Amino acid sequence: MEDSGKIYNAILVSGALNSGMSVVTDLLKECDSYFNLDPQDESRDDGKGALKFYLIQHPDGIMNMESVLVDNWTDINPDYAIRRFQKLVEVLGRPHSKLFRLGGDFNSKLSSQFVKLSNEYIDNLIDYTHQSHNIFRRMELNWINNLFQKFKNRIGLSKGYESLTTHISCPGDSFIPITRKYFNDLFSHIAEGKNIDHMVLLVPGAISFHPQRCMNYFHSAKCIIVNRDPRDMYLSARESTYLPRDLDHFIKWYKLMRVKSQKNEECENNILRIQYEDMVFNYEHSINRIFSFLSIDQSSHSFPRKYFVPDSSKKRIGKWKKYDRKNEIEKISHDLKEYLYNENELS
């Protein structure tokens, strides 16, 4: 499958949750031709409220589809992966309602064509669709629909569960070019009418663990991974609803995140690893590293310190020093000593 038109570069920004990833996305907002898929509060650097690009790393996202449709293909599982991705697209595309249902509002925040292009992407992955069922599909029905189907079968009004649609998909080597075209088409619609060459995506977690796999979904991609001192992250965890708040659990979680994010020599040339604290305390050196990595000319940094303001970010660093449970900080310092940030050793 050949792509036509302009090719956009993807800048994938990743790290563990609450690692301060958006210091990078905020910095790149200040540069010409870089479009940040984060249209929300531009004054924050903690990633809260930021538009996270869940299409890749979500349990029903593209990584999972590739695993099911390509790496671990069976005759049944692709149908489930496709239908789950379709549901994910529906949820991400629709408006968010605080009272009734979750939604990502991608159709408004990214492009009015998001759902349409995503469904076309799925259509390109499907070989054919037919009406059939298996016992596992029947298990998805509630007891009323199951009883109704059995009744229809008993009186001869239907044969089987013909209302259950099954998708057959075995894209093989074409999965990657189809996926690259999908993302590039989406980027093209997002960038319409703008002077944009690079798309900046906030992708927590997945890129850190599987950088080569994730970058392979784009024609051109680079990755920036942000790390942060575990002591401050622990205090953030105690205020969050999605990180382990128990001390022992947090230590195990943090160590697992860092171990799984170890350097991958296969693709390390396209990965930059930075420290959140360095971005604040060693601002000039850190942005020079990022600009060199992304080949950004300093003259393109048109709005310095407009979105990423190091002085404003200092309040999030060293909060552990004022934490009254000193024994917990001491345990983190002992068990995760190799990950502590030392202000006297700016990198």
Image (tube, rainbow, N blue to C red):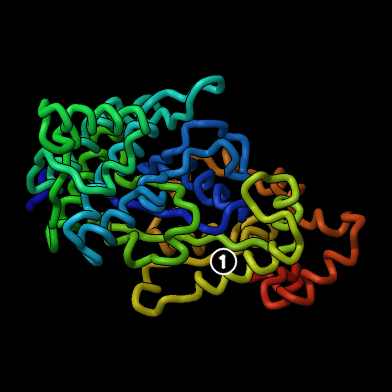
**Can you give x and y, in whole percent of width and height, for residue 218 in the image?**
26, 55
The number of discs equals: 1
Report which quarter residue 245 is drawn in. bottom right
**Can you give x and y, in whole percent of width and height, for residue 263 in the image?**
47, 76
Q: Find the residue positioned furthest to the front.
A: 155
Q: Nearer the viewer, residue 212 or 288?
A: 212
Q: Is residue 192 left or right of residue 204?
A: left
Residue at position x 55%, y 23% from top?
98
Q: Is residue 304 left or right of residue 125?
A: right
**Can you give x and y, in whole percent of width and height, for residue 213 in the image?**
32, 64
Residue at position x 33%, y 51% from top?
10
Would you place residue 152 above or below residue 61 in this image? above
Question: Which amino acid, mark 1?
Answer: Met
Report which quarter residue 137 is drawn in. top left
**Can you give x and y, in whole percent of width and height, for residue 304 in the image?**
55, 43
Instruction: Report the quarter where the C terminus lies.
Output: bottom right
Residue at position x 87%, y 55% from top?
323
Q: Residues within 10 Å of mark 1 (few under 14, many from 20)?
A: some
SS under mark 1: helix
Residue at position x 53%, y 58% from top?
15
The answer, for residue 8, to whether it is visible in the render is no
Q: Nearer the viewer, residue 156 or 93?
A: 156
The answer, for residue 2, to whether it is visible in the render is yes
Residue highlighted by disc 1: 257
